[in-house]
Image (cartoon, grey):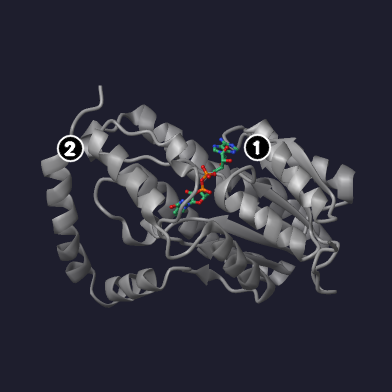
Amino acid sequence: MAPKSSSHESHKRAFITGAASGLGRELALRFARAGYRICVADIHEARANAVVDEIRALGQDAFFYHCDVSRDEDLQNAVAAMNDRWGGTDVLINNAGVAGGGPFDWLTLDDWHWMMNINFNGVLRGCHAFVPAMKEQGHGHIVNIASMAGLLNPPGMSNYNVAKAAVVSLSETLAPELHPFGIGVTCVCPSFFRTNLGESLRSPDLSTQQTLNKLVDNSTDLSAADIADRIFTAVVSNKFLLIPHEKAVTAWQRKCADLDDHLQAQHVLAENLKQRARRSN
Ligand SMILES: NC(=O)c1ccc[n+]([C@@H]2O[C@H](COP(=O)([O-])OP(=O)(O)OC[C@H]3O[C@@H](n4cnc5c(N)ncnc54)[C@H](O)[C@@H]3O)[C@@H](O)[C@H]2O)c1
């Protein structure tokens, strides 16, 4: 079947990190359906190659690029890989991420470094590598996948929250800064949705592990495909902040209206964490 594409979007080129699974995979398929050629960048080679096959079955060109977002050189070399293959990159999607959390004092500094190095520095590395090339070509769009955790900062997820809040901050800084160069920025803050994210979960607390896994597995209001679709629309319309879940929009508005009230409401979650925390080692 021929891929659906608009004349505006066809033949563009997207580089997507974490594209082997979950949201990244759905983004790869959504953009491919719109006529994009896709670089599937991930550390999971077998899953990534399966996504490459799916994209080719849609009639689009795609290739796998082994990219560990915790390594500077993997992102730096990605720019050249995209240039060699297709002469440049129109859309960069910094999506790769891992899950973590637990009581603040149970998290080791190593837990923090691991989380920051992937969930924030991975996004930073992507932006740092691709922005010069996008400036030179005079156009481009960057999508950074953050989380509602980066806006609402729920208790028991400090390292994940801080990494995602940093993604929001970097994105918000870059949006106006890159505008004069024809580069758009979209920052995405989803609540939980069903993917393989639980596979990467690292926590010293058994109840955090169980709760996060349940939240990811039982969230059915929006699928990864639904969110990918909304992200595609946000890119085409150059929208900055995308909060795909409606309930989360309400929570975000409440927090903006009264931060103390928001923090008060978090006490219930914190009490729950205190009662249920159990060391996993
Ligand atoms: N699923 C949710 O509930 C949820 C909610 C909010 C935000 N997010 C964010 O969405 C993004 C996508 O996650 P997902 O839910 O699709 O999870 P997922 O586990 O299904 O997909 C994540 C992908 O990232 C890859 N990855 C992990 N570490 C990597 C690294 N160092 N370098 C390159 N690739 C790496 C994995 O191999 C995997 O293919 C993440 O940034 C996550 O934080 C997810």
- Measuring from the top left, give residue 82's x and y in whole percent: 81, 46
Question: Residue 267 appears in which quarter of the rendering?
Answer: bottom left
- Picture residue at 46% right of the left edge, 36% below the top: 199
Horizontal arrangement in the rendering, residue 273 relative to residue 36 (left or right)? left
Residue 173, visible in the rendered structure: no
Rendered-image quadrant of the N terminus: bottom right
Kind of element beneath mark 1: helix
Circle 2 is placed at which residue position?
Answer: 277
Q: Rate crowding at label 1 as few (under 14), some (14 to 19) or many (20 or more) other CA atoms within 10 Å.
A: some
- Left or right of 3 on screen, residue 183: left
Q: Are marks 1 and 2 in contact (CB under 8 Å)?
A: no
* Residue 198 visible here: yes
Q: Nearer the viewer, residue 46 or 269?
A: 46
How far across and down, in percent of the image, does residue 175 sit? Answer: 59, 66
**Amino acid bearing label 2:** Ala
Q: Nearer the viewer, residue 145 or 22?
A: 22
Amino acid type, residue under disc 1 in the picture = Arg
Residue 250 lies in quadrant: bottom left
Mark 1 or 2, nearer chain start: 1
Above or below residue 277? Residue 271 is below
Q: Position of residue 107 (x, y in %)?
A: 29, 33
Q: Nearer the viewer, residue 270 or 139?
A: 270
- Does label 1 point to a residue whose CB lies under 8 Å from ligand 1? yes
Q: Position of residue 44 (x, y in %)?
A: 63, 33
Q: Which mark is residue 172?
A: none
Query: What is the quadrant of the C terminus in the image?
Result: top left
Q: Could you tell me which residue is drawn at 61 percent across and 50 percent down?
A: 24
Residue bearing the label numbered 1: 47
